[in-house]
Amino acid sequence: MKYTQIVPAISFLQINGISHDSPTLSRTNMSIVIINWRGGENDPFTYFSACMKQAFERMGRPTHIVNLDDSFMRELAEINNKGIDFVILWQGLGSQIGATDTDPATVWDQLKVPVLCYHGDHPCHMPIHHKATSPWVQHIYGTASFAMFANTYFSRETSATFFPTPVWFTDGVKGQFEGNFFVFPKNIDDLDATLDKWRGAPERLVASFLLEAADAIIGEFRNGNRTSHHDIIDGMLNAEVMAALCENLDNSEFTVRVHLHTLLDKIYRNMVAEHVVNDLKDVPLKIYGRGWERFRLRQNRHHEFLPFDAMSDNAFQFASQYGIVDAAPIHDSLHDRTLRAMSNRSGFLMGSNWSYETFLGGDYSDLFFDGAAGALRARAERVMQSPEAHRAQACDFARHYQQHFSLFNFIKHLEGMSDMVRARARA
């Protein structure tokens, strides 16, 4: 299911007859509100919201989860009667609630509460959720290159900020490991099918660009994965190419750019995912997710394909002796599955070039892989020879990561951002 604007775009005040500044309100229990959407594939936000709520409450902050559904306005009004300190929106979903084509004012403008949009996806996906212009809204990205793209191509009065996602997951196996296999949780769109579709597309100029860019992205992963695939795309979109594509697609430069990035973003993740299964062809691997039909036909006795249920129900995926293999969404990021492995003291192998030297000042190269032939296979061999040593190194990485990007510092960052937003909006 795609993100949708499911809350009616009508005045919050008209519905509820309340005002943030009303003198009749008794504001004795200022709280944090997390806006949750239950319609995503495998419902990740519900799990994230529950974990974040527990994290805030461990820091002494009353926290409420409000779902984007028919009860949204009523529940938000009830909480607002006691006082809202700030609101968290996953991926910016809900940042434009209340706005119309003729009136850009949102619910948040009327309530006058800081709204912090925490993004785990690249801004090319659902750009409407990255474009809020209200002074009450601040965008924060979990990946530096995502923030860079947003600050380069989205018009804002205040820059988006970057803060890596902390380890806030609280459930799981907690050190109880069994089964000599790796787990690879990943939904994919078949790479061959995507490229074949582009090869047969009638829009030859666009298709040619997509195929050329896909080839460059795949080549970079195989040759070290040092450059963001989004930077590769932008580097190919020089003025002449962009003008031709805009004319061909009859649309604005911004719209064309975002559209191309959206299409090619999937190339990167699906390519990394397929590389994992190909490079580990003789390694015991349990693969959770959709889209693996072509690989099922190989009938590889080392590989088992299984359904991927709701994220809240799959802690067992982190309980194997060998741990997980993970495909990050971009070369400079970690991923929620690796963070969850860290919380469970489980092992992981991460397909990214995350800058552990810069952030942590240590060499963790054995935990990361690129697309060089046999690089992942060699790391998997070390894991299989000594799962305990691999978990010890993963736990050492997790310990250093949590020291640098602690849950406490993350919450303090959010509190600082909310204070800044409130001061900015009232200036």
Image: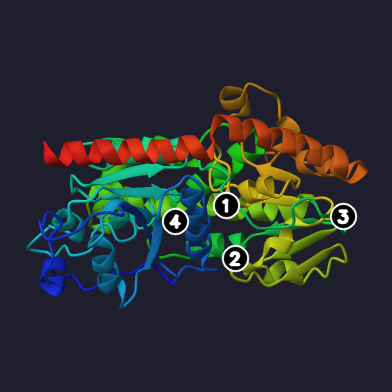
Q: Amino acid at mark 2?
A: Ser
According to the image, label 1 marks what residue? 269
Q: Amino acid at mark 1?
A: Arg
Tag in front: 4 or 3: 3
* Residue 390 picture quarter: top right
User: Would you say the residues marked 4 and 1 are in contact, meaning their CB atoms lie under 8 Å apart?
Assistant: no
Mark drawn on residue 263: 4
Q: Amino acid at mark 4?
A: Leu
According to the image, label 2 marks what residue? 312
Dot placed on the residue nearer the N-terminal end, 1 or 2: 1
For the point 87% across and 59% down, the residue is: 179
Mark 4–mark 1 Cα distance, whole angstroms, equals: 11 Å
Give the residue furthest to the right.
385
According to the image, label 3 marks what residue? 282
Q: Nearer the viewer, residue 209 or 331?
A: 331
Q: Is residue 247 left or right of residue 275?
A: left
* Residue 361 picture quarter: top right
User: 301 above or below 213?
Assistant: below
Dot placed on the residue nearer the N-terminal end, 3 or 2: 3
User: Would you say the residues marked 4 and 3 are in contact, meaning their CB atoms lie under 8 Å apart?
Assistant: no
Q: Nearer the viewer, residue 294 or 178?
A: 178
* Residue 358 percent location from the top left of the image: 57, 23
User: 412 above or below 19?
Assistant: above
Label 3 environment density (alpha carbons within 10 Å; few <14, some 14–19, many ≥20) = few
For the point 67% across and 68% down, the residue is: 292
